[in-house]
Amino acid sequence: MWASNRISCILLLITPFSWAANYRLPTSLEPQHYDLQILTHLNATDQRFEGYVKIHLLARENTQNITLHSKGLRIDEDRTSINSQFPGESNCVTNIEVDDEFEFYTLHLSRKLEKGKHYQLEMHFGAKLNDSESGYYKSDYVNSIDKEARSLAVTQFSPTFARQAFPCFDEPNWKATFNITLGFQNNYTALSNMPELGCREHEYLKNYTWCEYEQLPKTSTYLVAYAVHDLKNVHTIYSQTANKVVFRNWANPGFPEQFPIEMEPEVLSFYENLFKLNFSLAKIDQFFAPSHRFTAMENWGLITYNREKFARSEEDDLLQRLDANARTVAHEYAHQWFGNMVTMRWWNDLWLKEGPSTYFAYISLDALQPEWGRGDRFIARDLANFFAKDSRSTVPAISKEVQTPAQILGQFSEYVYEKGALTMRMLHKLLGEEAFYQAIRSFLKRYSSGNADQAELWESLREAAVEYEVISQNFSLARAMDSWTLQGGYPLVTLIRDYKTGRLNVNQTRFYLRNDIERHSSCWWVPLRFVRQNVPDFNQTIPESWLECPISENRTLELFHPPGEDEWLILNPQVTTIFRVNYDDRNWRLINESLQNDPNFGGIHQLNRAQIIDDVLALASVQIQNYDTAFDLLEYLKKETDYLPLERSVNILNRLGALLKGQEAADFQIYMRRLLLPIYKRFPKLSLISTTPESIRDISFQRFVYTEACRYNVDDCILQTEILTTSNQTGFWPKVPSNFRELVYCSYLQNGGEAEFQELFELFQKSENPAQQRIWAAVLGCSPNFALFEQFLNLTLKSDEKHIAECYMLATQSALSRNHLNPQMSNHILTHAKELDVKLKRRGFTNLLLRLAVNLQEPEEVEQLNTYLKDLKQFDEPLKKALDVARINQQWQKDCYRDFSQALRKRI
Ligand SMILES: *[C@@H]1O[C@H](CO)[C@@H](O)[C@H](O)[C@H]1NC(C)=O
Ligand SMILES: *[C@@H]1O[C@H](CO)[C@@H](O)[C@H](O)[C@H]1NC(C)=O
Ligand SMILES: *[C@@H]1O[C@H](CO)[C@@H](O)[C@H](O)[C@H]1NC(C)=O
Ligand SMILES: *[C@@H]1O[C@H](CO)[C@@H](O)[C@H](O)[C@H]1NC(C)=O
Ligand SMILES: *[C@@H]1O[C@H](CO)[C@@H](O)[C@H](O)[C@H]1NC(C)=O
Ligand SMILES: *[C@@H]1O[C@H](CO)[C@@H](O)[C@H](O)[C@H]1NC(C)=O
Ligand SMILES: *[C@@H]1O[C@H](CO)[C@@H](O)[C@H](O)[C@H]1NC(C)=O
Ligand SMILES: *[C@@H]1O[C@H](CO)[C@@H](O)[C@H](O)[C@H]1NC(C)=O
Ligand SMILES: [Zn+2]
């Protein structure tokens, strides 16, 4: 029996907030269950919701006040009540405080809530459906069949937006069960996390229905989801997963979506087997929302996707599209375990769900479709990004203290995902298959339907590692791993061999690309694993020893099987740990000989080959190595047969090329032409390719080689693209295989004039398919004529549509990567900075600035950047990052330009 005391209560005051000192909720009350009813109105003139929530609370301490989160909600104070289990214990709300900064709503009571007792808080509230893509928002679109404008309502609660939809304890550690009931007009469909229990007519609103959903198991508020919409279920799958999960796919019929529907049950089953823990819900709805703040959101049982990101077009590069979609889907499914079952205690450990979900997505896709070679491709990309980003001085740790909603949102950066994935991979390779998976399983089992932090993951891993004798009982895995997650950056490990005694001298220091900054004496626990030339086994990755932190000044090692004097030694097989390596000259020479002379590159793993080039070029740019040594190694690339080492090397060379001028720039063109020629020659003529190659690996390799060959005008590459465009004058080049279209169009513009530009510009304007428009946008950036290109840029700036604004970004990135039009581009971006910051959001604009900064070399250009942005407070952070990148370039100009161009000269 529950006593309701509403009648006897008189609300005294509502006052502004006065006491909070931090952003965390008090811990005196524990929410255990929510009954949530949301009535949604979605007609043209009235788009809002009304809600009722009853929160079951356990008092963990005596308290006379209740603080929870609420933002932008109209709460009906007269109908708020607190009820106790014991009749007669009447309690009243005497005073309410609200705080906009902390997003708190505090109720003061006339009587204490007593420790150990249960209470129920009832509140009535409402708000307009906003269009900020957060909380309970509305999304407008055009029905693709009847072409009518429609609206739907859907939630995005992660990370701190549930509080915009109902008053709640909006922190990930307060997990509770939820009974959700949705009210809506009959001509819509409603969905929530759980299967529907039953529906009934609304008691007085005509043509409205209430539907109730099964109880949602203990969940953090950021994972609750619901939608009221008129999308159609375009595909149902009755799967063979352990609990026969039913998959439904909700989309606007006819919209050019393409998603790998077939893969999803397989991915889910794969994780069930891998983690030895079944997915417990009966259904998963996949909801393709017309607008979405992110790419996707992993809500339990109701995964939402940004349909724009999933749209397909005729002109699409199928490979990239399928890769990106598959990665998103596999990532969201991994979250059902990492995030949904086991949730981080607080947002500082966001990587604890994003790292594993990113990494296990790679593992699952690689296992299910090995011929795509996704595992290594994705890892190679993450490694390339990591080594480039983390050599700056401004990188944060992946696990770092966050408090405010803005800081929490800021945690969702690519960096946390990528370095998080690399950290999981490091643990995987460090522990070995058996120990790693045992650790992961016991971690999931132990914390399932609860919360965990980083230390608890380390402990599960330590236990398994000790059991499998990978580490000793007294080794502190936590201390070792903290050195990777609690600081940014990475070490350069220097390995000097004593060829007489066979001993090794090893030390470490943080690697910075800038030499004019204050250096902190940081260090890492570096696992050491060596491979020697005569036994080139790159599969053994369990460490032989560790480089400690703080470091014993001069660490000398003796290997059990020391390499012979004429054998190379390579540290860090498969680049399982994220550090750079420098060797003594003789060892570099030995490595180089294998790369140049051995058809099999001495058996050196492709990720190590990529890393060797990346390392030696990075070391040369800080003058630890000279460019002669670097160029000697680069020679081997002419024979490289794998995509990954070639892609990484050429991308880095392209960036260096952007820093050259005049004679050196011309020399560089010649050099690149020579380097790429033998590789280009090994591929078939572009104009003769009629079908796409079978293997997806070959497609990416081919596309890359043609793109780079045409960029540097290698052999007949441009002529080949011309053959394709002239022989297809009727219609629009349908004969070009779709994977090569972008590069063919690009060459067409690069070598064409106004007519060619207008032709493609018109295609952009005519297209209604966002995926297709994105492709045209990137292609238009290939035009060397700024006056023409500017028409396009101004058009995108005028548009209110979000994806058109994104086209500005794609086109400018494309232009900047081609390194032409630099001054004009820089001008355009900077003079429209404020506008772009709004249109692209802060993150998109920061990325654009960073991309711009990579190309800046003249002091005047950097000055211009500074002048435009320095007085605008909102640009402090992006400006700092961009200036850091620009200073690295200037330093390179000063210190390396001569060395680089002399070494280059010798080789052309
Ligand atoms: C549903 O009905 C309401 C009220 O008649 C109307 O405003 C709305 O456009 C309708 N929605 C759909 C999807 O038919
Ligand atoms: C929209 O809803 C409001 C309030 O619920 C109602 O007064 C109005 O008639 C509705 N309009 C239409 C077109 O159904
Ligand atoms: C709420 O109650 C707790 C526990 O009694 C107390 O420490 C805290 O100061 C109170 N907060 C406010 C705003 O009164
Ligand atoms: C309810 O729906 C019926 C059938 O669609 C329609 O004829 C009627 O006008 C609607 N009533 C209201 C109050 O919207
Ligand atoms: C929540 O719903 C379940 C049925 O799914 C029901 O058994 C339970 O009693 C409900 N809880 C509350 C507090 O209403
Ligand atoms: C590491 O060793 C190399 C080679 O012996 C030496 O040049 C370098 O200064 C050492 N670095 C540190 C940080 O001790
Ligand atoms: C290393 O592993 C790969 C992939 O599992 C396998 O193909 C290769 O033969 C292994 N190499 C050695 C030396 O065991
Ligand atoms: C480091 O140790 C090696 C071998 O013990 C020794 O030859 C070398 O001189 C030492 N270097 C320094 C800087 O102490
Ligand atoms: Zn994620």
Image (cartoon, grey):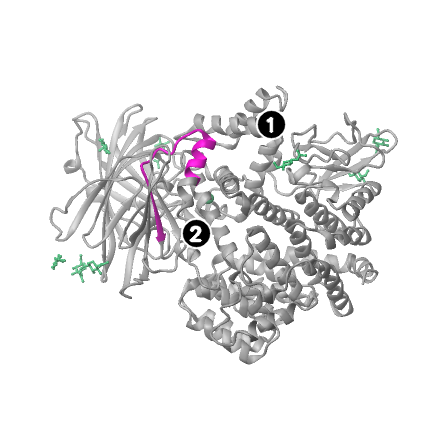
Report ligand 3 position as a quadrant: top left
State the separation of the CA atoms marked 1 and 2: 34 Å
Residue 477 shows which numbered tag? 1
Nearest to the observer: residue 859 or residue 271: 271
Residue 285 magenta-highlighted: yes
Residue 294 shows which numbered tag? 2
What x and y, as percent, mark residue 569?
A: 77, 36
Q: Quadrant of the C terminus?
A: bottom right
Nearest to the observer: residue 572 or residue 834: 572
Q: Judge the density around disc 1: few (<14), some (14-19), many (≥20) Cα neighbours within 10 Å.
A: many
What x and y, as percent, mark residue 277?
A: 42, 29
Which stretch did the figure color magenta?
Answer: 267-288
Residue 733's place in the image compared with 248, above or below, is: below
Q: Is residue 255 left or right of residue 593?
A: left
Q: Earlier in the sequence, mark 1 or mark 2?
A: 2
Amino acid type assigned to the residue bearing label 1 in the image = Leu
Q: Quadrant of the N terminus?
A: top left
Nearest to the observer: residue 191 or residue 842: 191
Q: Answer yes or no: do the residues labelled 1 and 2 have beta carbons within 8 Å?
A: no
Q: Is residue 472 visible?
A: yes
Nearest to the observer: residue 353 or residue 602: 602
Residue 309 magenta-highlighted: no
Residue occupying image coordinates x 88% and y 31%: 500
What x and y, as percent, mark residue 743?
A: 58, 65
Amino acid type assigned to the residue bearing label 2 in the image = Phe
In the image, the residue with mark 2 has its CB under 8 Å from the nearest atom of ligand 9: no
**Element under label 1?**
helix
**Element under label 2?**
loop
